[in-house]
Image (cartoon, coloured by chain):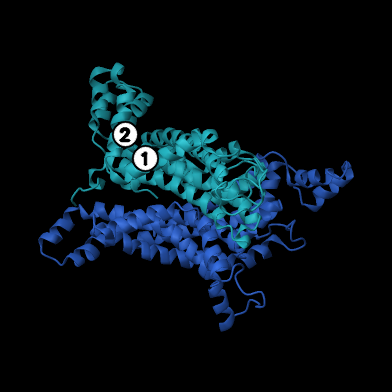
Chain colours: A cyan, B blue
Amino acid sequence: MTPTGTTRPTRPTTSAVKTISQGNHDAGANPLRVILRAFLTIWSVPKARIGVALLGVFVLLAVFAPLLAPYGATDNSFDRSEDMSAAHWLGTTAAGQDVLSQIIYGARVSVFVGFVAGLLSTIIAVLIGLSWGYLRGLAGDVINFIVNLFLVIPALPLMIVIAAYLQNGGIGMIVLVVVITGWAWGARVLRSQTQSLRSRDFVTAAVFSGESPARIVFREILPNMTSLIVGSFFGASTAAILAEAGLEFLGLGDSTTVSWGTMLFWAQNSNALLTGQWVLLFAPGLCISLLATSMSLINFGVDGLSNPRLREGATR
Amino acid sequence: MRYLLGKVGLLLLTLWAAVTLNFLLPRLMPGSPADAAIAKLAQNGPVSPSTRAAIEAQLGVPTGSAWDQYLQYLNNVVHFDFGVSYTFFPQSVASLVGTALPWTLVLVGFVTIVAFICGTLLGVLAAWKRGTWLDTLPTVGGTFASAFPYFWTALLLLFFLGYVAGWFPTSGAYGSAATPELTGTFLLDALYHSILPATTILITSLGGWILGMRSTMINTLGDDYVTFAEANGLHPRTVAIRYAARNAILPNLTSFGLALGGVVGGSLLVERVFSYPGVGYLLYTAVVNQDFPLMQALFLIITISVLLANFIVDILYGILDPRTRR
C-alpha cells in the first residue's frame, strides 16, 4: 500500500498554466526534458535512488539475458539437483537445468508482465478515474459502484478462478487477469484527485473559454496528476509482478515458461524442501521481492513530487 | 439510522453483484465443465453423444434459458446449495466449505487484527520520530517485507524452521493422530500448527499498516490543532497519541477493509504451502482437479466474507467518526 491516497492536491503546474495562455503548441513541452526533470526529482530522494538502481539492474538483466546467462534457460543436459559449484553458481534444478541461467532469463517474464500489466492497468485507471471524477450524476454513481465492487472483491481468488477457466494460458492470459483485477485502486485514487482539481480556477477558466470536457479532463487536469499516475503505475506493476508469481506458483500459468514463479512451482513440486536445496527456493523469491521493492522505493520519490511534506528531510 | 440503512442497502447490492458475477464468470468463459471432463475422456477414445448427455446430467450442467438458470442459481445460493463436488464425490460442496471455513476465518482474522494493532503502533512511532532509525527501520523494512510474495515467506519459514530446525510441524492444522474436538490438548496442537502460517501472514501484511499509518500520521502532525497542542506545552507523548494518532487512525480503518481482500488472497497461497486445511487449500485442490462447483462456491464464500468484514468496518467507522454519518 503506497501512501499516494493521502497526497494533497498540487498547485497547477506551470505547463498547465501555459497551456491556457498559449494554446496547444507547447503542451507537451519537449517530452525528453520533462522526463529528465521527473527523473531528477525522483533521484533526489535517497530511497527512490536505491529503487531506480535496483530496477535498472533487473531491466538490464532482462534485456541482456542471452549474453549474461552462462547456459540456456531450458538446457537440461546437466546433472540433476547439484549443489552450488564453480560450473553452476546456484546449482542445478531437479530437471538438470542451471539455476543461475533460469534466474537471469526469469527476469524477462517478471519485468515484461510488470511493465505491460502495469501500463495497461494505469491506462484504464486514468481513463476511468478521470472521467469518473469529472462526471456528475447517475453515470458517476454507476462507475462508483463498479469500481468499489472491483476494490472489495479479493483479487487473487478472482484471478485464480478466471485463470482456472482459461486453462494453461501463457503470459498473455496472466497479463489479462492481472489487468482485470488491478485497475480499480488507481482509478479511485485518480478520481478523488480529479474531483478536487475540478473546482480549481484554471478548470473554470477552461470551461468558460469553451473547451470540450474531454479536452479539459485530459489536457488541463491530467498534467497536474503526473505524480499520482506514475505512482499508480508502479503500484500496479508491483501488484502485477506478485500476482504473476503467485499464479505461476500455483501452477496456473504455462509451467514450461522459465520464470521466477514457475521456478518456485517446480522447486516445491520436486521437493527441494526435502533435498535441502534452499537456493532453489531462496533465489527466485528474493528476486521477486527485490523487483517489487524497487518499485515501492521509487514510489517514495514519486510521493515527494506532489507532497512536499513527504519529502525527505522536511521538518514537520 | 439512515446511515446504517444506507450501508445495509449497499451491502445487499454488492452481495447481489458478487453473486451475479459468480454466475456470469463460467458462462463468459470458453468451454464448460462437461467439456473439460469429456476432453479428459476423449484422450482414451471417441465419446458418444449418449455418454456426453450422461456426463452433463451427472455434473448438473444447467439447462433452460439463461434467465431460468439465473433464477435457479439465486435460489440455490440462498439455500446454500452449491451442488456436488467433482473431486470429493459424493460430498456436497456446502459441507466441504463448512469444514474448511473456520480454519481460515480464525487464522486470518486473528493475524489481521494483530497486524493492524502492531503496524499502527509502529507507524505512529515512525511518524513521530521521523528521520531517526525508529522511522527508517520500520519503513524500509516494511516496504521490503510487504514486497515478499506470501508463498515465498511461507516456503522459507517452512524450510528453515520446519525442516532444518525442526521446531514446528511442516504441514496440516493439527497432528495426524489428533481428531478435531474441543479439548485443551487439541487446541494447543492446533495453535502449535498455526504458528508458522500466522507468522508468514504477519510478516507480509505488517508493512502495509506501518506505511499507511505513518503517512496519515505525518499529514495529521502538520494540522493546526497539533501545533496548538505543542504550543500549549503538552507532553510530546500526549500530543502524539491523544491528539495526532487518534485522528490519523480513522482513514487507516477504511483501508483495513480493503487490505483484508489482499490478506485473504495471500493466505490462500500460505495455506497451499503448509497444506493448511482451510479455504485456500481447498480452492487450490478444486483448481488443480478442475472441480468447478467447488471452485465457484469457494470464490463466492471468500468474496462474501470480505464484503461482510468491510461492512462491519464501515459501521465501526460511522460510530467512531460522526462526520461520516451525515
Q: Quadrant of the C terminus of chain B?
A: bottom left
Task: Give the number of the disc on residue A39.
Answer: 2
Q: Mark 2 lies on which chain?
A: A
Q: Is residue A146 left or right of residue B125?
A: right
Q: Which chain carries label 1?
A: A
x and y percentages locating residue A22 in the rendered image: 24, 18
CB atoms of marks 2 and 1 within 8 Å = yes
Q: Is residue A220 left or right of residue B85?
A: left
Q: How many numbered marks does the figure carry?
A: 2
Q: In which quarter of the image is the N terminus of chain B?
A: bottom left
Task: Give the number of the disc on residue B309.
Answer: none
Q: What residue type is labelled 1?
A: Val
Residue at left offset 68%, top offset 59%: B81
Residue at left offset 30%, top offset 27%: A34
Q: Name the residue under label 1.
A: A52
Residue at the left extreme of this rendering: B232
Q: In this view, does B316 lie to the left or right of A314?
A: right
x and y percentages locating residue A188 in the rendered image: 40, 42
Mark closest to the chain's N terminus, 2 or 1: 2
